[in-house]
């Protein structure tokens, strides 16, 4: 106890061991849903890339996800000593799965994430990361969050079969009599009710409740085993974590290839990875810290007993590179950490507790890997609701040179099924409008640089 007191400076941060442990448990419960959701999102991309059986990817992706939750959160705990937990980011995983992997392949995509991680380490060391964040106009920052929320919601509805492709209208309602779709709708209502009632871990409980209803449906014959590729009843409860052999970058480095991919495409993907992850991490750190007294200074910057944001940003950057090597999408600080901070968490002991629980969860893979897409889809929709909520902060009335680019970002992400499309055309529109209106000096040099790269990509490469 004395070691924990001294190492994490509990008295200095006005907290105690029991409070920190309870806060860590709270954070874990609110974000453990990622162990079911992330393998589901990434699994589709892996299967499309290699045309293999579902079982060949899902196990390894689960292990990679859980492993990075443990490692990333441990780094944040022991190095930065903040009560923040890390996991593969929602939105970031969708961008990797539906854009990066689709364009360059699985292992080349992981290689780009590794490059991004290395760049972020350098940016964090020289404190340039905050400058990138600050160079993006506020309305575009908000619009990117809203657009990603809409995109995630679209993925959730599609995974549940609630919406399906249509040759004339591109998308339409699915079969409302399908048992998976029905269970999704029931699960969405249950999950929404839990969130409204502010139940801790509402997303995870919603997933488990929907999954339980699916098992009941299978037992009474309403759901046929194999509809989603497997029975809903797990073959075991506890097992050793599945192998990473198929999904990781380290042992498959020789399979990295950028054949037929232009440098403009590669550069664009890396830039957008940098932008979206920078917005996600810095915004999350500030948002979570706002939940606790004393964690932000008078200028709104992370204080934390004088440590500042540097260690937290560096922890996040290191974990991104390690995640690429393990075989999962960008790992970042989670907004769900706010639940632990609200429960009293103030130091790395909170995140140490969360990391320990994720380690234990690694051995329950048979359960997590049996949860079907219709059970995780409600969580995706609710996460979308969370992210879209910030649309009210976007200024749509006073300056249309701000409103139009923001709208382009938001609407293109779900309609083009691409986060990068929204960012590319939103940035170009923003710079073009400002210049044409005689407000060129109000645009940051970084925005001009991004607009130039994106415009060249649109002109000289085949768009996706």
Image (cartoon, rainbow, N blue to C red):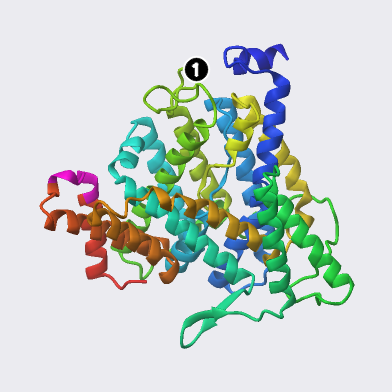
Residue 444 inside the magenta-drawn segment: yes
The residue sitting at the right extreme is: 220
Residue at 81%, 74% in the rendered image: 225
x and y percent of residue 65 in the render?
A: 62, 50
Q: Position of residue 343 (x, y in %)?
A: 65, 30
Density class for disc 1 (Cα within 10 Å; few <14, some 14-19, many ≥20) is: some
Q: Quadrant of the C terminus?
A: bottom left
Q: Residue 93 location, x and y as percent?
A: 52, 56
The residue under label 1 is 305
Q: Is residue 143 left or right of residue 441?
A: right
Kindly identify the residue that appears in the image at 59 percent across and 68 percent down: 157
In the image, is residue 323 above or below residue 381?
A: above
Which residue is pictured at 45% across the width and 45% down the height? 280
- Please give left or right for residue 241 compared with residue 94 in the image: right
What is the residue that sits farthest to the bottom in this orientation? 168
For the question of whether residue 293 can be seen, the reply is yes
* Residue 22 is a magenta residue: no
| The magenta segment | 441-447
Picture layout, residue 44 above or below residue 238: below
Front residue of 200/235: it is: 200
Q: Position of residue 315 (x, y in %)?
A: 50, 34
Query: Which image quarter is the N terminus in?
Result: top right
State the residue in front, 284 or 46: 284
């Amino acid at each position: 106890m004395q070691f924990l007191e001294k190492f994490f400076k509990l008295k200095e941060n006005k907290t105690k061991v029991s409070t920190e442990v309870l806060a860590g448990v709270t954070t874990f419960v609110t974000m453990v849903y990622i162990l079911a959701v992330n393998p589901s999102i990434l699994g589709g991309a892996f299967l499309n890339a290699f045309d293999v059986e579902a079982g060949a990817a899902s196990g390894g992706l689960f292990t990679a996800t859980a492993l990075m939750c443990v490692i990333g959160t441990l780094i944040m705990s022991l190095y930065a000593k903040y009560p923040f937990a890390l996991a593969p980011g929602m939105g970031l995983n969708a961008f990797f799965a539906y854009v990066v992997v689709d364009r360059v392949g699985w292992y080349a995509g992981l290689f780009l994430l590794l490059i991004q991680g290395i760049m972020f380490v350098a940016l964090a060391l020289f404190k340039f990361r905050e400058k990138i964040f600050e160079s993006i106009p506020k309305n575009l920052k908000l619009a990117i969050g809203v657009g990603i929320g809409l995109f995630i919601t679209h993925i959730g509805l599609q995974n549940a079969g609630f919406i399906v492709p249509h040759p004339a209208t591109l998308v339409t309602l699915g079969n409302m009599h399908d048992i998976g779709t029905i269970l999704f709708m029931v699960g969405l209502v249950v999950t929404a009710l839990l969130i409204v009632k502010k139940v801790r871990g509402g997303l995870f409980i919603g997933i488990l409740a929907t999954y339980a209803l699916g098992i009941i449906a299978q037992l009474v014959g309403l759901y046929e085993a194999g509809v989603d590729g497997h029975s809903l009843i797990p073959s075991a409860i506890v097992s050793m974590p599945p192998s990473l052999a198929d999904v990781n970058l380290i042992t498959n480095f020789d399979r990295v290839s950028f054949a037929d991919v232009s440098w403009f495409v590669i550069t664009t993907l890396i830039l957008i990875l940098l932008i979206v992850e920078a917005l996600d991490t810095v915004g999350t750190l500030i948002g979570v810290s706002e939940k606790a007294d004393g964690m932000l200074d008078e200028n709104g910057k992370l204080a934390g007993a004088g440590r500042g944001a540097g260690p937290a940003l560096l922890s996040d950057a290191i974990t991104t590179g390690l995640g690429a090597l393990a075989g999962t999408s960008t790992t970042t600080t989670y907004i769900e950490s706010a639940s632990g901070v609200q429960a009293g968490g103030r130091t790395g002991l909170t995140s140490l507790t969360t990391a320990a629980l994720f380690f234990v969860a690694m051995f329950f893979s048979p359960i997590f890997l049996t949860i079907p897409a219709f059970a995780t889809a409600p969580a995706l929709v609710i996460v979308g609701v969370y992210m879209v909520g910030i649309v009210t902060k976007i200024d749509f009335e006073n300056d249309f040179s701000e409103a139009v680019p923001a709208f382009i970002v938001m609407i293109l992400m779900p309609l083009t099924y691409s986060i990068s499309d929204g960012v590319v055309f939103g940035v170009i529109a923003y710079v073009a409008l400002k210049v044409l209106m005689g407000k060129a000096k109000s645009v940051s040099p970084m925005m001009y640089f991004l607009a130039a790269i994106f415009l060249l990509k649109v002109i000289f490469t085949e768009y996706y």
